[in-house]
Image (cartoon, helix red, strand yellow):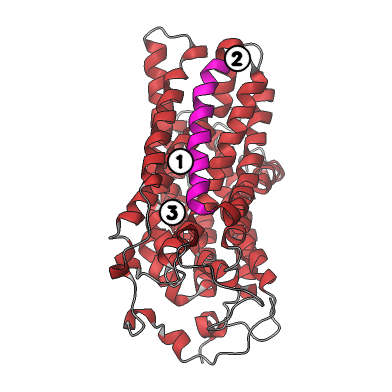
Amino acid sequence: MSLLSFLDREHTVARPGFSRWMVPPAALCVHLCIGQAYAFSVFNLPMTRLLGLTQSAPGDWKLTDLGWIFSIAIFVLGFSAAIFGRWVEEGGPRKAMFTAACCWAGGFFVSAFGVSIHQLWLVYLGYGLLGGIGLGIGYISPVSTLIKWFPDRPGMATGMAIMGFGGGAFIASPLSVWLMSVFRTSHHIGVAPTFAVLGAVYFVFMIVGSIIVRVPAPGWKPEGYVEPEQTKKLITRNDVFVYDAIKTPQFWLIWWVLCLNVTAGIGVLGQASAMSQEMFPGRVTPVAAAGFVGLMSLFNMGGRFGWASISDYIGRRNTYFVFMLLGIALYCTVPYMGRIGSVSGFVICFLIIISMYGGGFSTVPAYLKDMFGTRYVGAIHGWLITAWSMAGIFGPVLINYIREYNVTHGVPKAHAYNVTMYIMAGLLVIGFICNFFVKAVDARYHMKADDPRGSNPQTANATAPAAARA
């Protein structure tokens, strides 16, 4: 038996007495680490002064060039999740988490080398490509496992893990700033050694998560669990093969629901500081704007757990109806708050909007489980995450370019975002319509009992231990 066989799915099957409540912390070990992606902007300004140290010098990198690092990483996140989704599902969470740790940490190490020799393409390759693969695999690695351990509360379970992705920046941002201050000398600004340390720290924590994680024994159910009725809240008892799922109208309707919800939120998230200062000139200071961004991050994180947990009671489809209807009302209210000069009203609107932005991410895995079953939900989720990649382009473009167009055509900066807010509301109207047409998957897509695609050679030969403790 090879050393790496420890990573195989059959070696992660839970033994009797294993508590399913150990799995969410294992998932958090991964998601809190890869959630650093939301804090990468703390490196942007320091990396424009790698040569000049105190200010940019000839040959230093430009912010516009550095902005591509995060964009590449998010784009690769979506498409690596799609490409490797089936492999993650069949190989098991431990192998996926280990691979994600190697790619994510390796991305930091390659980037550290790129910074040290001042080669931006190496940072694109490291953090953008290699790190992006780690992001994609790491993001989806625990989803299917959590849903299998918590069939009674799938929304809450995925919400706990994906909450970590939203909250990872709270740890990474101050840690990165502190490390750069520790490593800063008269000769370098401290970015390269900070990358190296972060890579090592994240590797250790992600490996811990991969060691802790377990999959339930075949046929395991929580004590006292009764499967819901077939028609209740569009919850199916049948499984759909991943490549059949992406042929269904339901998949693409949910794809657009997620894409439009994220598009409406991600542009605002990236421009919250500038928007608050420009809509309320002289009243919102840069310090207050920074506090507003931090508060939004808290609501982003809290919304991932809160809304996903609520969806266990009102249903996933109804939860997205709330996102769309409430979002439409709030986006239409923001320009009014600007006109009457209500900073508090503006803040409340966007805090709720961002909570629903986060909630959209954490609720969708359970939505997919309801529609397509549990067998390939991780792989299907991987394909759906491409909606995030697209939204990462659509949202900032809508916010930035429409604002720029308005300002260049004489619209005061305080009102330059009004048209964008109404467009965002319009996008959510389309999202509402898409969600309305989501119905139960046609039976012709359901996997049959003797379908060879439904068997996993790794688990088929594994001995099924007694049921684990709920």
CA–CA distance in space, label 1 to label 3: 18 Å
Query: Which residue has dot 1 on it?
Result: 261
Q: Which residue is drawn at 39% across and 51% down?
A: 254
At mark 3, the secondary structure is helix
Query: Which residue has dot 2 on it?
Result: 280
Q: Which amino acid does label 1 sit on?
A: Asn
When the figure is inspected, residue 441 is found, relative to residue 454, above or below; the finding is: above
Within 10 Å of the Cα at label 2, are there few (<14), some (14-19), or many (20+) other Cα atoms? some
Query: Which residue has dot 3 on it?
Result: 77
Q: Where in the figure is residue 266, as x and y percent of width and height?
A: 49, 37
Q: Where in the figure is residue 287, as x and y percent of width and height?
A: 69, 24
Q: Residue at x 57, y 62 (%)?
A: 154
Q: Would you say residue 331 sits in the magenta stretch?
A: yes
Residue 253 visible in rendering: yes
Q: What residue type is labelled 2?
A: Phe
CA–CA distance in space, label 2 to label 3: 36 Å
Residue range in magenta is: 315-337
